[in-house]
Image (cartoon, rainbow, N blue to C red):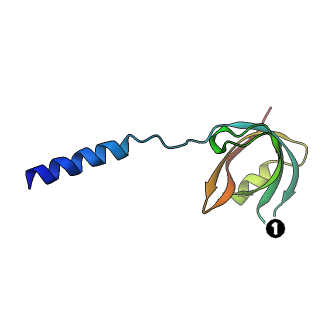
């Protein structure tokens, strides 16, 4: 019984230290906002946590309120992650 507990504790320690890919802030420019679909089109630099090159693409947004703080033409710093299998903007702020 004691051996089993030690093995479980060791396994939990290993899994708790496994590196999880973390989002990294990326620079971009908003080209289009689609508030009805909660989506934004962004021309962006490389997204390292997703191993993605610079390009223009459409993203879902985690919080529709983010779209009210920006407009087409704004330069932004944002973070993207996979949420339920979709590439989703999880943070976004207008650059000054």
Q: Is residue 84 above or below residue 31?
A: below
| Residue occupying the far left of the picture | 1
Query: On the picture, is 35 further left or further right than 10?
Result: right
Looking at the rendered image, the quarter that the C terminus falls into is top right
User: Which residue is pictured at 61% across the width and 58% down the height?
Assistant: 83
Numbered-mark total: 1
Q: Is residue 91 left or right of residue 31?
A: left
**Picture quadrant of residue 88:** bottom right
Relative to 23, residue 61 above or below: below
Residue at 62%, 54% in the rendered image: 82
Give the quarter of the figure containing the N terminus.
Answer: bottom left
Residue positioned 74% across, 37% down in the render: 46
Residue 66: x %, y % from top left = 73, 52
Is 53 displayed left or right of 20 in the figure? right
Q: Which residue is mark 1?
A: 36
Residue pushed farthest bottom? 36
Report the front residue among 53 and 75: 53
Q: Nearer the viewer, residue 64 or 8?
A: 8
Q: Position of residue 16 (x, y in %)?
A: 36, 44
Q: Residues within 10 Å of mark 1 (few under 14, many from 20)?
A: few
Residue 27: percent from the left, percent from the top? 77, 36
Residue farthest top in this picture: 96
Label 1 residue SS:
loop
Residue at left 70%, top 40%? 47
Q: Residue 40 location in percent, x, y?
A: 81, 55
Residue nearest the observer in this picture, 73 or 56:
56
């Amino acid at each position: 019984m004691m051996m089993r507990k030690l093995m479980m504790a060791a396994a939990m320690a290993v899994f708790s230290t496994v590196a999880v890919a973390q989002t990294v802030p990326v620079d971009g420019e908003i080209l289009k906002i689609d508030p009805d679909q909660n989506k934004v089109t962004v021309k962006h630099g490389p997204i390292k946590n997703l191993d993605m090159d610079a390009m223009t693409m459409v993203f879902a947004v985690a919080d529709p309120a983010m779209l009210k703080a920006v407009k087409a033409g704004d330069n932004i710093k944002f973070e993207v992650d996979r949420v339920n299998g979709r590439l989703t903007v999880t943070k976004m702020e207008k650059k000054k």
